[in-house]
Image (spheres, rainbow, N blue to C red):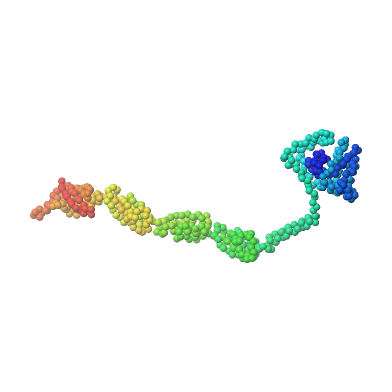
Amino acid sequence: MICPQCHTENRPGAKYCNECGLPLPQDVAETIDATQNLEAIVIDEDDQQDVSEAEQDNTSNTDELTGEEVVVSDSEEQSVEDESPKEPVANDMDLTAFIPVKAKQPHATDLSGIDECLVDSSYVPPQPAWRNGDTVEMPRVDEQQVKQREYKAPGAPEKKSKKGKVGAIIVVILALAVVIALAITHQMEMWGGKSVPDVVGITQSDAEYILDTKGFAVTSVSEPSDEAEGLVLHTDPAAGAREEGNLSITLYVSTSRLVPDVAGLARDEAVNKLAEDGFENVEFASERSNAHEGLVLSVSPEPGTRALSTDAITLTIAEPFTVPDVIGKTVSEATQELEVDGYMVATTYTYDDSVEDGTVLSTDPEAQTKLASGETVTINVSKSRAIELEQQTQSLLEGLAASGEPLMVDSANYIVLSVNAVTYEGNNATSFVITGKLTYTAPDGETITGDPRTITGYITWTDDNYIETISATQN
């Protein structure tokens, strides 16, 4: 079957052109004479009984080539759709172009959807060369083109009830009206409870007035804040919430932050307490004290002072007293340092000639030992035996010189006029050089005193610094 528009050959019985989608005529002329007059269409024998009724509905169609009319009935149109179309009988000598019979006007084919089958704009149809023996050159068709040029004939138009459409539209409009009405009445708080107004940032009195006019029962709670005093910080429930039934709301009103009194608390407890009040910038200082280690001794700023959350809060923490390290210092230096910390000082001596006399060798308790202030610390001081015995000897001789008493050596007595030298000789022995006069008592009882002379002698001492032996000779 040849398409009258693009002249493409289609399969027998096709209702639409596979190339351009044009609806194809279903009734064709069985013969065309030389004068191009169309004869009556052959009608199936099964439809003969309906021909007389169908002729009343026929519509006259004019042949585009001859100008004559071709009659097509409704029954023929239905018969063509149900049955395979009859092949037209062509005259071998007839060179007249095939002209399709137009459908009746009342039954014009529904062309909606044909735009879905538009031909690619780049395609150029071949020139018609049928019935002259020539071969028609067809374009190459690949799989992609086949898929792109699949045409689907539009289905028979469905008859829609206008009344059904109108009814559906009315239902939709009514539903929308109900939804809008519900939304408006809900917004007007005619149902669904009342919305909590936003009173954050205004004064407590203004907020209470607004909430009271809305019917809310108001409870106020103070909350430390850096904001100005008396402003609403937040509400419970929050602004925008819908409340039904018992309309009550709690206002959290700002109040100044006050430094809490955390003295006497442990360090961690004090820090947590400050954090609860919004103070996060906490600094620490230490002070030696007899209080329990780690206790807060004081707070700065003082408790009760107004402060911002960003202000620094300094906690002074108790630190135990410890025995200072005074080893290597002199007795006086060590005593002064210990007394500054409140310690009582006791002194012991140990003979040690390896260090300077009077140097602290050790302490009891040892250095860095925790010890409460007021306790006693004993310092162990080095003592030189040489110096000690030299001083002891010097003191003895000078005392004799001052008193005029003689130095008794065996049976001789020496009056000490001056002390010239005293030297430690080791092993608890000292030597001395003095200027003195020998005195003795004659048999007749007379005291005889000699001339002044240099006298040298030796003294040995006990560990308790008592004279064990003494000897002297005059030069």
Q: Position of residue 197 (x, y in %)?
A: 64, 60
Q: Is residue 140 left or right of residue 353?
A: right
| Residue 104 visible in the current orientation | no
In the picture shown, does residue 63 fall above or below 226?
A: above
**Count of numbered circles in the view:** 0
Quadrant for residue 187, please give it. Answer: bottom right
Q: Is residue 44 left or right of residue 455?
A: right
Most distant residue in the front direction: 45
Quadrant for residue 254, please give it. Answer: bottom right
In the picture shown, does residue 213 fall above or below 123?
A: below
Of 223 and 89, the residue lying toward us = 89
State the residue at coordinates (84%, 41%).
87
In the picture, the quarter occupied by the N terminus is top right
Q: Is residue 353 left or right of residue 189?
A: left
Most distant residue in the left direction: 444
Of 355 and 80, the residue lying toward us = 80
Q: Position of residue 81 (x, y in %)?
A: 82, 47
Q: Is residue 181 left or right of residue 233?
A: right
Q: Position of residue 355 (x, y in %)?
A: 29, 48
| Residue 269 visible in the current orientation | yes
State the residue at coordinates (14%, 48%).
451
In the picture shown, does residue 400 fall above or below 137?
A: below
State the residue at coordinates (22%, 49%).
427
Q: Position of residue 390 (x, y in %)?
A: 23, 50
State the residue at coordinates (19%, 53%).
468
